[in-house]
């Protein structure tokens, strides 16, 4: 008979933390009117027959607070990099100067700020869903263990409460990260 998986609260918490770290990484890429090399992290370029992150075909630098510079290593990749940045839905329009793409970071107007907040909310909801999936996995394991008489009903209820507590904690952390980013975006 196959060994039933046992519930590992630490593993569930680690998986929830992964979802939170992913959210924080995505929120870090949302621009708030200031240039940051991390703005271009979501950009992937069609290069050499595959999709690769922008930082594997170019050097990204921040020459001034409201500008980015992308130095493309291979001259034949300049058009692909330009297209990838434009298609990334970041609201950025590069200017090509030889092998360098210059990107001015526009001032955020009220409408753009609201759009950014909506994107932040979408990222947060995806993180919440990921955390809920982890919770569901944990509860499924408990139900299987109870059904197979591997644990008692009391143990199942106790472990289920632990899983719920970890979930609530993770959701709270997600909400805090979202609130901080929302405040940062809406500040004029």
Image: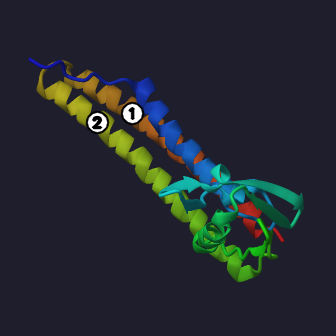
For mark 2, what is the residue?
139
Residue 176 visible in the current orientation: no
Q: Position of residue 157 (x, y in %)?
A: 29, 29
Q: How far apart are marks 1 and 2 (CA)?
A: 8 Å
Instruction: Identify the residue shown where x is 12% and y is 23%.
Output: 148
Left or right, 62 with respect to 77, comes to right
Q: Where is residue 106 in the image (x, y as percent from the top left)?
A: 80, 76
Instruction: Identify the residue shown where x is 50% and y is 44%.
Output: 19
For mark 1, what is the residue?
163
Left or right, 65 with respect to 40, comes to right
Of helix, strand and loop, which one carries label 2? Answer: helix
Instruction: Identify the residue shown where x is 61% and y is 73%.
Output: 83
Q: Say which quadrant the C terminus sits in.
A: bottom right
- Give the mark nearest the N terminus, 1 or 2: 2
Q: Which of 49 and 33 is in front in this view?
A: 49
Q: Which of 97 and 166 is in front in this view?
A: 97
């Amino acid at each position: 008979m196959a060994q039933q998986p046992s519930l590992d609260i630490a593993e569930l918490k680690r998986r929830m933390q992964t979802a939170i770290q992913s959210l924080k990484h995505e929120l870090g890429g949302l621009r708030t009117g200031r240039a940051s090399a991390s703005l271009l992290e979501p950009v992937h370029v069609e290069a050499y027959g595959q999709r690769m992150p922008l930082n594997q075909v170019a050097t990204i630098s921040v020459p001034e607070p409201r500008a980015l510079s992308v130095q493309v290593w291979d001259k034949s990749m300049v058009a692909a990099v330009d297209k990838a940045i434009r298609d990334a839905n970041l609201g950025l329009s590069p200017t090509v100067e030889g092998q360098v793409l210059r990107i001015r970071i526009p001032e955020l107007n009220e409408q753009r700020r609201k759009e950014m907040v909506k994107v932040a909310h979408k990222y947060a909801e995806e993180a919440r869903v990921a955390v809920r999936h982890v919770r569901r996995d944990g509860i499924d394991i408990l139900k299987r263990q109870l059904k197979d008489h591997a644990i008692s009903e009391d143990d199942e209820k106790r472990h289920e409460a632990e899983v719920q507590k970890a979930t609530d904690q993770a959701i709270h952390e997600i909400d805090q990260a979202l609130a901080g980013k929302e405040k940062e975006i809406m500040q004029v």
